[in-house]
């Protein structure tokens, strides 16, 4: 089967679970004998290590998309200028711009992208269709998220193939936008969902949420969790002396970094955990610098600035080294997530998770039996739960073994890939 996985590139400056999910999935498809490629939009998958993916160019280059939205006469720019703005150097520079990760102010651009052939990026869509139709000729196209649904109608029309779409955290992007736009955008999302042959939600929680928001019929909706390759993570029992709390995500307010810092400060005030350490990885953007400095100032004021360690390299092949030095992992995202790949990565390495009772987190903890949840999502509640979990060595070991086994039995990339392939085949047969 020939499969094109269309994903938004992000430049590689911070940990992106969705991006890692897509990359791992494409690799496993190839491993199992399918002809599959990851086709990046906006930015390279990693602007600093590899500009393209197996020679695949970046479509809808971020600079071109932005200029076509804002400058009318550039909507039909000459090819040489289009290629200049889509060059590796320009995209590397763009990937450093903090605005690329903000939803605020991009309402009109999001609408234009969802409109597809009727949007201001029509020329970009034509280039993509030409590449798919005359160069790749896929059997199915898989969109990484529902914000890309504007591509679907033209793909189905020109290539006569099904388009499948993953559902993961689109609400975070849309709900961060101006209130005046949210109703319009959700309405447009519902309309464009008619162009999708099958939706794949990463959790039951998120499937239920998006089905209501986008009026998705039951027969189109499937729930298939994220998968990881357990062999990519070296299993060890959680470290005990000293206890080490880990954080893996972009270091910003929305992902709960401040809650972790404040909880760590509270935890250190408890006599039995005065020797506890905090290890952090996941990267940042320019937007995050001021916020991070503010958090580090708190540690200095409490005299524990030397008890935190930052690990710059968060590539999958290096994460086992990070996890094998932890006792527990916590990423208390303020509003929760549709899944959170870092949870599976942690569990695969034998590190229990401690997560807030929000969104899909309780579902994952219940299914894996690999950790604990707490509420409300506050630093005090997290500190208390950390103290409880860290203080029970037998429970820690039980969580560790349960987590690893659940990844092997329920969340392996092999198992997930087989489920998604069956959805592809069903969509192809119907088409």
Image (cartoon, grey):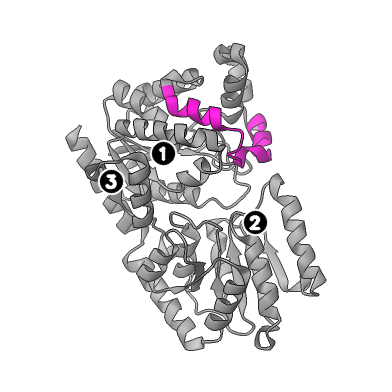
Sequence-wise first label, 2 or 1: 1
Can residue 38 be found in the magenta stretch? no
Q: Position of residue 225 (x, y in %)?
A: 36, 56
- Residue 251 is marked as 2
Mark 2 element type: loop
Question: Is residue 105 or residue 371 the one in the foreground?
Answer: 105
Considering depth in this image, is 341 or 298 the residue closer to the camera?
298
Residue in front for this viewpoint, 108 or 371: 108
Judge whether 143 appears above or below 385 on screen.
Answer: above
- Mark 2 surroundings: few (<14), some (14-19) or many (≥20) residues within 10 A: many
Magenta stretch, residue numbers: 89-116
Magenta span: chief secondary structure: helix
Identify the residue under disc 3: 221
Q: CA distance from mark 3 to mark 2?
A: 33 Å
Q: Is residue 54 above or below residue 395?
A: above
Q: Earlier in the sequence, mark 3 or mark 2?
A: 3
- Mark 2 vs mark 1, CA separation in Å: 25 Å
Picture residue at 45% right of the left edge, 22% below the top: 125
Identify the image quadrant of residue 81. Answer: top right
Residue at position x 62%, y 38% from top?
A: 100
Q: Is residue 38 visible?
A: no
Total numbered circles: 3
Residue on which disc 1 sits: 146
Q: Residue at x 49, y 25 (%)?
A: 112
């Amino acid at each position: 089967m020939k499969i094109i996985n269309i994903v938004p590139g992000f430049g590689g400056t911070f940990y992106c679970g969705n991006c890692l999910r897509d990359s791992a999935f494409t690799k496993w498809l190839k491993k199992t004998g399918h002809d599959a490629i990851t086709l990046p939009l906006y930015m390279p998958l990693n602007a600093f290590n590899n500009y393209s993916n197996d020679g695949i160019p970046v479509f809808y280059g971020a600079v071109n998309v932005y200029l076509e939205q804002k400058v009318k006469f550039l909507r039909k720019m000459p090819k040489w200028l289009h290629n200049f703005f889509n060059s590796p150097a320009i995209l590397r520079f763009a990937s450093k711009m903090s605005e690329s990760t903000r939803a605020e102010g991009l309402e009109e651009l999001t609408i234009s992208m969802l409109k597809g052939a009727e949007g201001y990026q029509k020329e970009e869509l034509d280039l993509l269709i030409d590449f798919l139709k005359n160069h790749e000729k896929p059997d199915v196209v898989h969109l990484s998220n529902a914000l890309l649904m504007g591509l679907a109608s033209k793909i189905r029309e020109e290539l006569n193939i099904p388009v499948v779409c993953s559902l993961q955290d689109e609400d975070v992007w849309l709900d961060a936008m101006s209130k005046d736009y949210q109703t319009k955008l959700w309405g447009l999302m519902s309309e464009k969902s008619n162009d999708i042959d099958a939706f794949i939600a990463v959790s039951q929680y998120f499937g239920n949420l998006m089905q209501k928001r986008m009026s998705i019929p039951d027969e189109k909706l499937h729930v298939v969790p994220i998968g990881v390759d357990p062999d990519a993570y070296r299993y060890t029992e959680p470290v005990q002396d000293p206890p080490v709390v880990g954080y893996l995500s972009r270091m910003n307010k929305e992902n709960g970094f401040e809650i972790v810092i404040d909880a760590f400060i509270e935890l250190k005030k408890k006599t039995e955990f005065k020797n506890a350490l905090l290890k952090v990885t996941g990267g940042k953007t320019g937007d995050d610098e001021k916020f991070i400095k503010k958090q580090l100032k708190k540690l200095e004021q409490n005299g524990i600035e030397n008890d935190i360690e930052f690990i710059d390299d968060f590539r999958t092949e290096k994460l086992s080294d990070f996890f094998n030095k932890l006792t527990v992992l916590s990423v208390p995202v303020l509003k929760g997530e549709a899944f959170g790949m870092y949870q599976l990565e942690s569990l695969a390495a034998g590190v229990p998770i401690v997560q807030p009772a929000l969104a899909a987190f309780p579902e994952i903890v219940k299914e894996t039996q690999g950790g604990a949840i707490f509420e409300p999502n506050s630093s005090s509640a997290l500190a208390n739960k950390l103290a409880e979990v860290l203080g029970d060595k037998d429970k820690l070991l039980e969580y560790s073994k349960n987590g690893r086994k659940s990844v092997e039995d329920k969340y392996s990339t092999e198992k997930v890939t087989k489920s998604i392939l069956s959805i592809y085949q069903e969509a192809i047969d119907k088409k």
